[in-house]
Amino acid sequence: MTKRLPEFAVEALEDVCVVGTFEASKWVSDGDGVMLLVGERLVEGQFDGVDAQARRARIRFNEPADLAQLRVRARFPFVDIYLGDKAALVLDRSKEWRLVEFQPVDAVERVAGDVRILAKATSDDASASVEEGGWDHEHCEICYEKIGAAGLPKGWTSASDEWLCEVCYEAYLKPRSLGFIVID
């Protein structure tokens, strides 16, 4: 069941951080990354000086300019960095998406000790061991459904090579919904 996101209430603005109170959340402890939802944009920072009992904390922002978007006595929904990256992808209206059938591309093999690592081949990999068609699938950025070999034949992709399965595209990206975030 999807519930509303917990909120952070701004009490004071300081140099590169805000001070305030937060609703109970498993996403809050010192050093944890956080993303505040400001309109349809997520601003990124880290929790600092967390007092879990009083539910008070500071958030230090990665981009000090983000502080200008916040106001004292305003409340902002928040998520952790892991879910925030997915939420940012869904909310980003600048990306163009197209539905395509997945086609394998070349991969390069790298060996680190006893571990074999495959990565997509690039033009910089001329001296590496290339495996033709070795990159045979991607995963949906939201649900991790496999797209390609032994998975779904088609998916939605962006110019920056992010992939969404058709279900997540229709359920979340198309309506710009954060419904995939489940609050315990």
Image: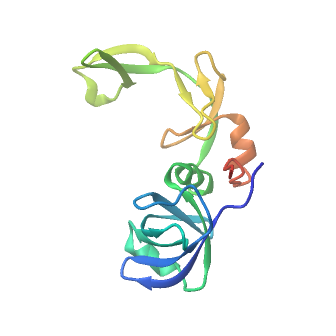
Q: What residue lies at 37% left-to-right and 13% top-to-bottom?
A: 131
In this rendering, would 166 be left or right of 141? right
* Residue lying at the far left of the rendered structure: 127
Image: 107 above or below 16: above
Image: 89 above or below 47: above
Horizontal and vertical percent position of residue 32 = 44, 57
Q: Nearer the viewer, residue 133 or 4?
A: 4
* Residue lying at the far front of the rendered structure: 53
| Quarter assignment of residue 110 | top left
Q: Nearer the viewer, residue 153 or 69?
A: 69
Image: 150 above or below 93: above
Q: What residue lies at 61% left-to-right and 44% top-to-bottom?
A: 97
Horizontal and vertical percent position of residue 146 = 60, 26
* Residue lying at the far right of the rendered structure: 1
Q: Nearer the viewer, residue 98 or 59?
A: 59
Q: What residue lies at 66% left-to-right and 50% top-to-bottom?
A: 181
Horizontal and vertical percent position of residue 64 = 38, 74
Horizontal and vertical percent position of residue 111 = 27, 18
| Quarter assignment of residue 38 | bottom right
Q: What residue lies at 52% left-to-right and 66% top-to-bottom?
A: 52
